[in-house]
Image (tube, rainbow, N blue to C red):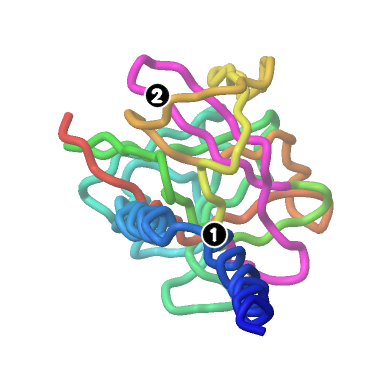
Amino acid sequence: MKLQFILAGIALAMPVAGALAQTPPAPAATTATSAAATTPKPMRPPLFLREEWQQTAKGGEHPANAQSVANSDLELQLHVPAGEMLLTGAAGDENNPIHLWTGMCTTPCAASFSSRTRLADLSGLARIRLNTKMSGYHQIRPIVKLADGTWLVGDQTTGGTRDWLLSELFFADLRWTKLDIARVVATGPVLDKVDLTRVEAIGFADLMPGSGHGPGGWSDVAQVEVYAKSISR
């Protein structure tokens, strides 16, 4: 009888021992959780530049120039035959804000900004925000000039034909190709890796000539903002 009780006790104890043997060790899970908690989260960079354009006292439509820029820290470059990119619109008018217009461009055209004191680091969560309106098949693409003088144009576009559209593009999401800035023509090939940590100029390009006044084809670009880390020149 005693032997039967001893055997029954051993049988009951065996599943418990097996379950304890299969329990995973706690320190491994604790270590993984600790590592995840210490991984730094990406941070949004601050505003690097903002341009809303500056109309003349006379107003109306006229060739854009250095005086069209309201931000005193920025230098504007127009990559287009002289006098073909126009400034128009009125301050405070949401239906017709002050903007650059590419309708009179007889070739592809572009505009870029550079800070007088800083370079931009466009890595991480750096982005460009544009308020644009298009006609026809026209679109706006981001362009950059690296500190070594290389010009690049991005593969993504922005712009809507129905009304003014505020949109953002992350620089890290773009694929890039070299840009012949004298002709505003992409020369390829698409680059797999681009170091955007030292950028001298940032802007936008319309790779199609304009069609003049009317609904044929053109780009409007009003407010431009770039969010990026600053680097002293």
Was residue 157 drawn as part of the magenta stretch in this picture? Answer: yes
Q: Quadrant of the N terminus?
A: bottom right
Q: Residue at x 69, y 34 (%)?
A: 207
| Three-letter residue code for mark 1 | Ala
Was residue 190 drawn as part of the magenta stretch in this picture? Answer: no
- Please identify, in this view, whether the residue under mark 1 or under mark 2 is nearer the observer: 1
Residue 21: which disc? 1
Q: Residue at x 59, y 30 (%)?
A: 153
Residue 113: which disc? none
Between the C-alphas of marks 1 and 2, the distance is: 60 Å
Residue 160: where, in percent of width, then height?
73, 62
| Of residues 8 and 12, the one drawn nearer to the viewer in this rendering | 8
| Of residues 65 and 203, the one drawn nearer to the viewer in this rendering | 203
Q: Quadrant of the C terminus?
A: top left
Q: Residue at x 44, y 57 (%)?
A: 25
The residue at which mark 2 appears reads as: 146
| Of residues 138 and 87, the one drawn nearer to the viewer in this rendering | 138
Is residue 75 shown above or below 165?
A: above
Give left or right: position of 23 versus 135. Answer: left
Which residues are the magenta region?
Answer: 139-167
Locate residue 195: give its quadrant: top left
For marks 1 and 2 on the same chain, the one whose residue lies earlier in the sequence: 1
Q: Secondary structure at mark 2?
A: strand
Residue 81: where, in percent of width, then height?
56, 27
- The answer to whether one can see residue 216 in this image is yes
Residue 205: where, in percent of width, then height?
59, 38
Is residue 48 shown above or below 118?
A: below
Residue 213: where, in percent of width, then height?
74, 53
Q: Secondary structure at mark 1?
A: helix
